[in-house]
Image (spheres, rainbow, N blue to C red):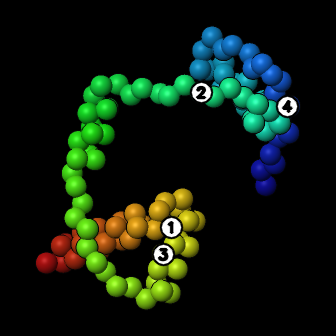
Amino acid sequence: MHMKKKLSPAKLPLPKFPSDKEAAEYFERHSVAGVWNRLPEARQAKPLPALAKKIRDRHARAKSPISLRLDPEQIAAAKHIAAAKSVGYQTQLRMWIAEGIRREAKRA
């Protein structure tokens, strides 16, 4: 049985880290739970231009809205399963549909 080690509480201000490796080592030994709400807001990350283009292209591929009638129990079950996986229930439903299409296409 793996026991979780007790982390020392972090103090503010957090130290400046010369490398990601040193930051990782610090946070393996220290917990920010006690100071989380007092940490400064991080600046918005700016993706590299190639990644930004891929994101724009992906969003540009529009999905067509459809009307689909489901039993309330099916919707509730999908929401429950999706929440356990930390995804939206409509995303979960789309993944199930895509999986079913792939499976059926192999049979055809």
Q: Residue at x 86, y 31 (%)?
A: 8
> Disc 3 on helix, strand or loop?
helix
Would you call the spot at circle 3 few (<14 residues within 10 Å), some (14-19), or many (20 or more)? some
Measure how far apart labels 2 and 4 are at the Cα level: 20 Å
Q: Residue at x 39, y 28 (%)?
A: 47
Of badges 2 and 4, the one in the foreground is: 2
Give the labeled residue for mark 3.
Answer: 78
Measure how far apart labels 2 and 1 are at the Cα level: 29 Å
Measure how far apart labels 4 and 1 are at the Cα level: 34 Å
Callouts 3 and 1 close, C-beta under 8 Å: yes
Mark number displayed over residue 9: 4
Residue 6 on image: x %, y %: 85, 39
The N terminus, quarter of image: bottom right
- Answer whether residue 14 is visible to the viewer in this image: yes
Callouts 2 and 1 close, C-beta under 8 Å: no
Give the labeled residue for mark 2.
Answer: 42
Q: Is residue 45 left or right of residue 14?
A: left
Label 3 is placed on what type of residue? Answer: Ala
Which numbered disc, 3 or 2, marks the residue that appears first in the sequence? 2
> Disc 4 on helix, strand or loop?
strand
Residue 29 on image: x %, y %: 78, 29
Give the labeled residue for mark 1.
Answer: 82
Q: Residue at x 48, y 75 (%)?
A: 78
